[in-house]
Amino acid sequence: MPTDLELAFPILSAHDLAALAARGRDRRVPAGEVLYSVGDTGVGFFVVLEGEIAVVDGTDADARRVASVGPGQFTGEVSTLSGRATLVTARAATDCRLIQLDGPGLIRAVDELPDVGEAIVRAFMARRQMLIDSGYEGVQIIGSRFSPAAHELRDFATRNLIPFHWVDLETDPEAETLLRGVNFSPADTPVVIGRSGKFKKNPTIAEFAHCAGLTASFTDDRVYDLVVVGAGPAGLAASVYAASEGLDVLTADQLAAGGQAGTSARIENYLGFPAGISGKDLTTNALVQAQRFGAQVTVPCMVRSLGLDAGDRVVTLADGTRLRTRCVLVASGVAYRKLDVSRFADFEGAGIYYAATEMEAKLCRGEEAVVVGGGNSAGQAVVFLARGSRRVHLLVRSGDLGASMSRYLVDRLQALENVTIHLGTQVTRLDGDGRLREVRARDRSGREVAIETGALFLFIGAEANTSWLRNCVALDKNGFVLTGPALPPETAQAERWRLAGRAPFLLETSLPGVFAAGDVRSGSVKRVAAAVGEGSQSVSFVHAHIQRPV
Ligand SMILES: Cc1cc2nc3c(=O)[nH]c(=O)nc-3n(C[C@H](O)[C@H](O)[C@H](O)COP(=O)(O)OP(=O)(O)OC[C@H]3O[C@@H](n4cnc5c(N)ncnc54)[C@H](O)[C@@H]3O)c2cc1C
């Protein structure tokens, strides 16, 4: 088994070096020359044939060295594949002879040379983690731990693997000094100080992303083969398959790659991971896999609307940018309804669940559990959990359970001795220390109940992220996207389908060339595996549409 260091800095064989040399440019670089500096984008890839490159944390002459790259080794980490701003500076420590490949050249090499490609991708992923572990500070975020705006920035940084240093106004004496240094007061927080020394008070997510080097640029005249909206499991699966099959793909997500699955502490039921895998690991791997095939994944990038223009589909972003494309995949998922109580986000994935399967049931076996909701899904969850839990509390906002739940379920619940039904009751407070420990709720009379529990199940519905699609593709009555056989019969009679001479494909919406996959699709199974399956499958329909455009 190679050590972490060997994985991060492998030495390529003479055979591999020759294969890379045939694809790159031979360069001689004198000692001291800077190959790229912190913040540069699209920096390319350098393989050392002779000499040594110093990789340093910053741009000053005395910047801390984080790595040395010697003969047979190469520069780069995950941002090299995406062309995003680099986190470090690379400088020739001695006279060097190098092979240089640009971004597309690197992606082609990874694709065409499987052994070298594997070594490069593994090294890139290991290096980002090593950099963070080595004390690399990245962007500084100064704010109060109780500020939702500061929380949003930290959440965005964490979900997008942006290295950052959190300076807590409440406890860190360094905070005021740092703020004074940039002429701000605590009232101006959250404040972000970038690597280049640029700073901003209370930045929007877009401004913060720009400061961290995430922002993408688009060329006006480009027509993509496929624009994927949403980089959850469905969107990432489609991006991997489409890019690996040679399609020109852009994937846009309003927040971060990973979607809901990326927020799951542990996914136990996804095929191929017998010990389970954290949602973050699963979706980070998927993101790198998509980028390694050449998909452009861009965040934060909110899509505002979809339209048609002279045969192309046009996706308009929140900042007004218009992207032209032959096909669109709607993979914008759902947003589960959440409770409006403080500290909610602290326990998402650490005690708050949106499904009650064997896996979740195990987590509260022998303990108390709380279910919120008045519909059949809540009732079924209570019946299921009551088999193994000491007590299950059902909190229902309305005063009449029969109004929203089937009679047989109400009867069954009432017959279960270890179920307590709290009618007219709402959650008021959550407490815990890293994970949920207590749920407090209050009924209409003002009586408060405190339940010691590590498991809160929410069945208060989910809303499809389809506001950007209204009046454009057919939706069901709940706002989910209708596809294929689920489309109303009159769809096939529409002029555009008569001209197409075919019925919509299985995952095609009412607009030809616009497909939908995953949780956003009406009737889909709300699971990671189902979303991945549909995302992958949609690519075959994309090919079919491109071959015979409508
Ligand atoms: C806490 C939690 C735990 C879970 N655990 C499991 C589990 O263990 N096993 C399992 O099988 N399933 C689990 N699920 C369900 C699973 O995560 C979902 O079924 C799956 O993520 C759906 O994938 P998707 O790609 O269809 O949509 P999503 O994951 O919802 O991704 C949609 C993406 O689209 C983006 N988006 C939305 N609107 C726009 C827009 N206008 N512009 C740009 N981007 C947009 C969102 O930011 C999001 O990233 C869990 C869900 C949650 C919330």
Image (cartoon, helix red, strand yellow):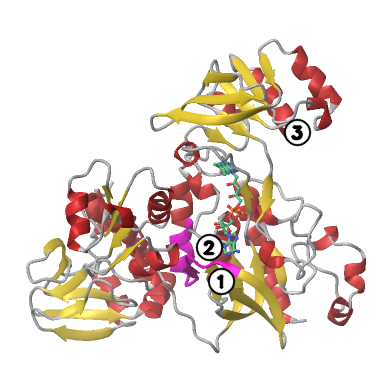
Q: Does the residue labelled 2 lie within 8 Å of ligand 1?
A: yes
Residue 234 in the image, given as x and y percentages of width and height: 60, 57
CB contact under 8 Å: marks 2 and 1? yes
Residue at disc 3, secondary structure? loop
Residue at disc 2, secondary structure? loop
**Mark 1 neighbour density, 10 Å: few (under 14) some (14–19) many (20 or more):** few
Residue 278 in the image, given as x and y percentages of width and height: 46, 43
Residue at disc 1, secondary structure? loop
**Mark 3 neighbour density, 10 Å: few (under 14) some (14–19) many (20 or more):** some
Q: In this view, does 283 lie above or below 297?
A: above
Comparing 125 with 343, the one in front is: 343
User: Where does label 1 land, which residue?
Assistant: 318
Q: Is mark 1 within 8 Å of ligand 1?
A: yes
Q: Which range of residues does the magenta coloring cover? A: 286-303
* Number of marks drawn: 3
Q: Is residue 21 above or below residue 340?
A: below
Q: In which quarter of the image is residue 232?
A: bottom right
Q: Is residue 448 above or below residue 550?
A: above
Comparing 527 with 347, the one in front is: 347
First along the sequence among labels 2 and 1: 2
Q: In which quarter of the image is residue 180?
A: bottom left
User: Where does label 2 land, which residue?
Assistant: 254
- Look at 38% across and 70% down and name the residue there: 210
Q: Is residue 465 magenta?
A: no
Q: Nearer the viewer, mark 2 or mark 1?
A: 1
Q: Does the magenta stretch include residue 293?
A: yes
Q: Which amino acid, mark 1?
A: Ala
